[in-house]
Image: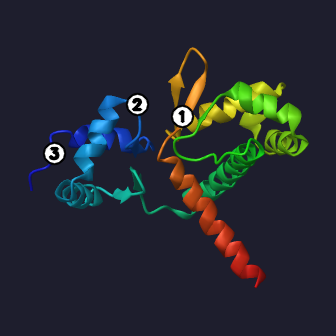
Amino acid sequence: MQLPTVTQDIFEYLSKGNFISEDTANDEIRDLHRVIESNENFELLREYFSKIGFQLEKGAGFYYFSRQEKKQDLERKIEQAYKWLDILDFLKYYGSSVNSIFSQGTYFSPTKIFEQCNLNENLAEKLKKLKSQYNELNKEKPLDQINKIIELLKDETFVEIHNPYTDEYKVLASFGYLEKLFGMINISDKSLNE
């Protein structure tokens, strides 16, 4: 088995819970994506990582690790999933309020989201709900709450800074992970009502 020379780099990045997205501006991460993308490499890496308890997963334009979880870890992940779903709901509502789709490739800034909260009462209410439900979002000012949401998205590699001078961010392919999670829950809720 001839593993790619960057296998350790791939492991170190993914084992931190990050995503390797094809559309990142970071050349090193984009190169890692190209290495994994090769069918031969993907299968080799998938087999190699599975031997040490990590499952290399492929999304639409991104890669990540998954693992079999203990019950306590699973409960924590479910709580995290609820938070991400609430954040996704807020962002999707923001997108629709400006006649756009908040998804991969979207460019946005905290200031524009804040301005829209001032114009759209429903969006402002969604932000207040996030503040009341999640301690890390319990900031005094709405713009600080929005900045914290973006910081969480950036830390999880769902977005990256596009233009630091205008404080503009870009939504990456890995954001599709959240959208897929949200889609599965919507389908599940819909089937329960039938």
- Any part of residue 119 in sight: yes
- Which of 114/77 is in front? 114
Closer to the chain start, of discs 3 and 1, is 3
Name the front one of labels 3 and 1. 1
Q: Position of residue 99 (x, y in %)?
A: 72, 45
Residue at the far bottom in the pictured view: 194
Closest to the observer, 87 or 23: 23
Q: Residue under label 3, please give it.
A: 4
For residue 174, side relative to residue 52 (left or right): right
Query: Position of 129 compared to 169: left or right?
Result: right
Graded by Cα atoms within 10 Å as few (under 14), some (14 to 19) or many (20 or more), the crowding at tag 3 reads some
Residue shown at 37% from the left, 58% from the top: 58
Across and down, in percent, residue 153 comes to: 58, 38
Residue 33 in the figure: left or right of residue 157: left
Q: Are marks 2 and 1 in contact (CB under 8 Å)?
A: yes
Tell me which numbered mark, 2 or 3, is placed earlier along the sequence: 3
Identified at 32% across, 30% down, the residue is: 27
Residue at the outermost left position: 2
Residue 25 badge: 2
Residue type indicated by callout 2: Ala
Please say if 119 is above or below 49. above
Question: How far is the residue under mark 3 from the one under mark 1?
Answer: 29 Å
Instruction: Give the answer, above or below, for where 150 lies relative to 73.
Output: above
Q: Amino acid at mark 3?
A: Pro
Q: Report the quarter where the N terminus lies.
A: bottom left
Identify residue for label 1.
170
